[in-house]
Amino acid sequence: MHFVKKLKQALRETNSHLIVGLDTDVTKIPQFFKSAPNPIADFNNSVISATKDYVCGYKLNIAFYEKETELGWAAITSTIANIPQNLITIADAKRGDIENTTELYAQAFLDGFGFDSITVQPYMGQDSARPFLRRKNKFVWLLALTSNYGAKDFQFLKINKKPLWEVVTEKAITWNDHKIGFVVGANHTNELKKITKAYPDTPILVPGIGIQKNSLEKTVASLSHNLFVINQSRSIIYSAPKAQNETEFCEILSENAMKARDEINMLLVVKKKK
């Protein structure tokens, strides 16, 4: 199934635009997980069990797994196997290199681990994204406007009176407009409105809600289409630091994931009425 079709189906079936980010730091997980042979895998699988009814997918920040070497790679395999097939998966790897190197990244993340999609840096141009785009039914989330404070260093520099982020989106959409979406931080509401209006059929991945404390209300209001997913990581997965067992842990995470999903949906209803 084409990724965009899978995404639309997931949004419809789950009634959710929420992505849970599995940015799993073994030092921050509840103590009772740490006696497991692979604490990261056990933690992730409990998070999935607790939240799968309230999300449209999961995003794994690969740095947290690379740090743990063999244990981390094993955790990715276990995690992907436990995510329901109808939900989307994102390898937040932010790769981007010369084509023969990128081909190996595509083999690792899309072919090997079986992720549906991957985040990619656009700086090296079309050939650095081409191996990802060649994969059938896979998808690229291209970094357009990131939510970190350093985004202003380059992303808003003017080129022929246009900010660099706009030049990037205009160029990248010509590479393959059915296999490319954009990552746009929640703090860039004006730009979110412009991008979603310009590209009504292009999916958007929005980070920066939750711990980063950007306004969900302003973010949802700025979106000109509904083909978007909003990532929340630490605000959900670390919301039960004092849980004494898995049952208590899952109850707390379930409640918080449901609240996050419902808040997005409520804001969409409010926007529709205006």
Image (cartoon, helix red, strand yellow):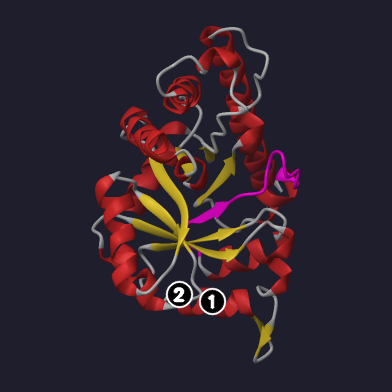
Which residue position holds label 2?
Answer: 172
Q: Main secondary structure of the magenta part?
A: loop
Spatial CA span between label 2 and label 1:
6 Å
- Image coords of residue 207 (percent x, y): 61, 49
- Classify 98 as above or below 30: below
Q: Residue furthest bottom?
A: 160
What is the crowding at mark 2: few (fewer than 14 residues within 10 Å), some, or many (at least 20)? many
- Classify 232 as above or below 218: above
Residue type beneath disc 1 = Val
Q: Is residue 93 left or right of residue 175?
A: right
Question: Which label number is shown at residue 63?
Answer: none
Q: Any magenta on residue 201?
A: yes
Whether residue 149 can be seen here: yes
Q: Any magenta on residue 94?
A: no
Residue, x 69% and y 57% (percent of image)? Answer: 148
- Image coords of residue 12 (percent x, y): 43, 38
- Image coords of residue 119 (percent x, y): 46, 57
Residue, x 55% and y 56% (percent of image)? Answer: 225
Q: In this picture, which residue range is highlighted in magenta?
A: 200-216
Residue, x 53% and y 76% (percent of image)? Answer: 168
Tell whether label 1 touches label 2 (CB within 8 Å).
Answer: yes
Q: Is residue 89 left or right of residue 17?
A: left
Q: Secondary structure at mark 1?
A: helix
Q: Is residue 119 left or right of residue 9?
A: right
- Image coords of residue 233 (percent x, y): 59, 37
Q: Secondary structure at mark 2?
A: helix
Instruction: Give the quadrant of residue 243.
Output: top right
Question: Which label number is shown at residue 168?
Answer: 1
Residue, x 29% and y 65% (percent of image)? Answer: 103
Whether residue 175 can be seen here: no
Residue type beneath disc 2 = Ala
Instruction: Give the quadrant of residue 36.
Output: top left
